Image: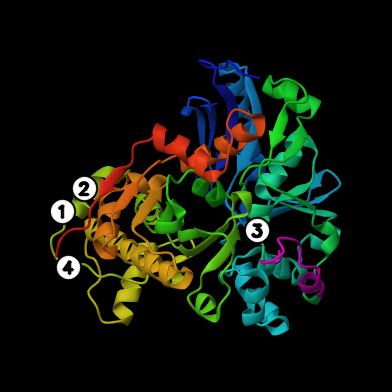
């Protein structure tokens, strides 16, 4: 299908983040190297606390994204395919076609208790050699151990689907696991890229619930007839696996030379790393808490998770709980105007993981160390920005040392690319120039993988990134002289 806009092919990207989702129609003409985005729909997303714990409102999320897709087909009938990406690690359990409850949210408290039990069976050093993953208490392997030992639905389920795959199943009826997201479960062999059945058996998990693996660019099949009718889409329209972990899609759209660049995919989380051809599972990488996650075309995303803009967004949510509305650009302008020293805290301290009074926890962190806590909202915002910039700079340094990549440029993509203070301070603290943009990197990567599968674009990742570089001009931040 072609000719959607000036000869370009059209695809629909569903891009789901931890705080919001969006549907974007992308137009790609590989022959001329052009790329355009049409933002069709945006909708909120977030946790819901039920009696059983912290969950996602998957039903509401699916309703909103299908409404967005219906709008996309009304606006552009020539859409050739649909691709879905989302955050990692979380999953839904099904019996047949029935979803056994709303998926748990990765910030739910149940995960902490399962960590020690997993490590008693498989010590973390061995686990890292097998799956290459940074320790995070919400990795799927720990969630499943909590599910197994609690009163969850794992024993009733015949299949487990990660969030993008769960959406793909609702759209097509296909039960699969896309590899980039499957690599975040802790159950995929870091060297083989296949389910680690020995590990699964040792942890007393049920391998039969894990679906077959597919790769970015593979077809999941056509839309169910009833879904196509609801969307106003052609029956059998193709749904394509993309880099369904949102960071995997975002890295596709980083206009970088991988041999000399680091990236920061900055949203709710800050994913800081480099792109490699092979994993790094050394003791030094494990001790630095770096992860090896799957990338598009078999690349490895060697990165470290930093708490990210969650620190700022959750602080705003806490301040606004009484009904006040805070203008974020204005607050950041006030933060930039702060002239005195502010405390740089450990942005990765586990106490900042859960929702709630983050400003109070920052003050608590300061009190424990006998340092001055921020006194105003502007100082809190500046302290958060400085702490994130320091964490980003440190992660870039570690990534360079551990991987051997000589980092000459840092690319910031995602929502954090709009935060001028954060980008400048990251350049200042790292001593490396920062190139900011594109903001919608995740959706762009989703679009480009679909476009290549449909024949609208061709070539390797470098060819796709050349399209991005032509379409979006980054903003450059030069380190301040000292």
Q: Secondary structure at mark 2?
A: helix
Q: Nearer the viewer, residue 95 or 233?
A: 233
Could you say which disc has been placed on residue 51 in the image? 3
Q: Residue at x 47, y 42 (%)?
A: 441
The quarter of the displayed image where residue 64 is located? top right
The quarter of the displayed image where residue 53 is located? bottom right
Q: Nearer the viewer, residue 390 or 256?
A: 256
Mark pair 1, 2: CA separation:
6 Å
Above-or-below relation of 412 to 31: below
Mark before the other along the chain sequence, 4 or 2: 2
Q: Which residues are magenta?
A: 188-201
State the colouring used for the structure image: rainbow
| Front tag of 4 and 3 | 4
| Rendered location of residue 168, percent (x, y) | 71, 40
Mark pair 3, 1: CA separation:
44 Å
Q: Which quarter of the figure is the N terminus placed in?
A: top right
Q: Would you call the spot at circle 2 few (<14 residues within 10 Å), some (14-19), or many (20 or more)?
A: some
Q: Secondary structure at mark 4?
A: loop
Residue at label 2? 333
| Rendered location of residue 284, percent (x, y) | 50, 79
Q: Nearer the viewer, residue 117 or 153?
A: 117
Could you say which disc has been placed on residue 337 in the image? 1
Residue at label 4? 341
Q: Would you call the spot at circle 3 few (<14 residues within 10 Å), some (14-19), or many (20 or more)?
A: few
Q: Residue at x 42, y 55 (%)?
A: 264
């Amino acid at each position: 299908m072609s000719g959607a806009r000036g000869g370009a092919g059209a695809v629909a990207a569903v891009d789901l983040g931890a705080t919001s989702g969006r549907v974007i129609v992308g137009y790609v003409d590989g022959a001329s190297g052009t790329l355009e985005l049409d933002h069709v729909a945006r909708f909120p997303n977030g946790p819901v606390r039920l009696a059983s714990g912290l969950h996602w409102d998957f039903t509401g999320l699916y309703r909103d994204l299908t409404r967005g897709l219906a709008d996309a087909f009304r606006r552009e009938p020539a859409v050739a395919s649909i691709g879905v990406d989302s955050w990692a690690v979380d999953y839904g359990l099904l019996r047949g076609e029935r979803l056994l409850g709303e998926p748990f949210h990765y910030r739910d408290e149940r995960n902490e208790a399962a960590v020690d039990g997993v490590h008693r069976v498989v010590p973390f050093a061995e686990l890292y050699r097998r799956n290459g993953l940074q320790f995070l208490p919400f990795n799927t392997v720990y969630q499943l151990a909590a599910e197994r030992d609690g009163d969850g639905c794992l024993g009733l389920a015949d299949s487990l689907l990660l969030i993008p795959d769960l959406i793909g199943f609702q759209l097509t009826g296909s039960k699969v696991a896309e590899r980039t997201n499957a690599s975040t479960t802790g159950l995929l062999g870091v060297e083989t890229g296949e389910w680690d059945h020995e590990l699964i058996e040792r942890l007393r998990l049920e391998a039969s619930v894990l679906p077959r693996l597919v790769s970015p660019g593979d077809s999941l099949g056509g839309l169910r007839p009833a879904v196509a009718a609801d969307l106003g889409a052609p029956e059998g329209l193709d749904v394509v696996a993309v880099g369904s972990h949102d960071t995997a899609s975002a890295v596709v759209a980083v206009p970088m030379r991988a041999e000399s660049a680091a990236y920061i995919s900055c949203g709710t989380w800050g994913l800081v790393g480099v792109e490699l051809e092979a994993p790094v599972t050394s003791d030094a990488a494990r001790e630095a808490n770096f992860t090896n996650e799957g990338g598009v075309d078999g690349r490895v995303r060697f990165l470290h998770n930093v708490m990210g803009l969650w620190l700022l967004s959750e602080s705003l949510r806490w301040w606004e709980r009484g009904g006040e509305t805070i203008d974020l650009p204005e607050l950041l302008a006030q933060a930039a105007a702060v002239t005195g020293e502010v405390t740089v805290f450990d942005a990765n301290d586990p106490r900042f993981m859960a929702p709630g009074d983050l400003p109070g926890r920052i003050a608590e962190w300061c009190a424990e160390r006998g340092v001055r806590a921020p006194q105003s909202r502007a100082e809190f915002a500046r302290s958060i920005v400085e702490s994130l910039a320091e964490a980003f700079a440190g992660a870039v340094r570690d990534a360079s040392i551990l991987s051997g990549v000589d980092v000459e440029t840092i690319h910031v993509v995602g929502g954090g690319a709009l935060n001028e203070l954060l980008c400048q301070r990251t350049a200042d603290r790292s001593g490396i120039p920062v190139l900011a943009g594109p903001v919608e990197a995740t959706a762009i990567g989703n679009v480009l993988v679909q476009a290549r599968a449909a024949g609208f674009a061709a070539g390797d990742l470098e060819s796709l990134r050349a399209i991005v570089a032509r379409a979006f001009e980054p903003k450059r931040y030069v380190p301040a002289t000292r």
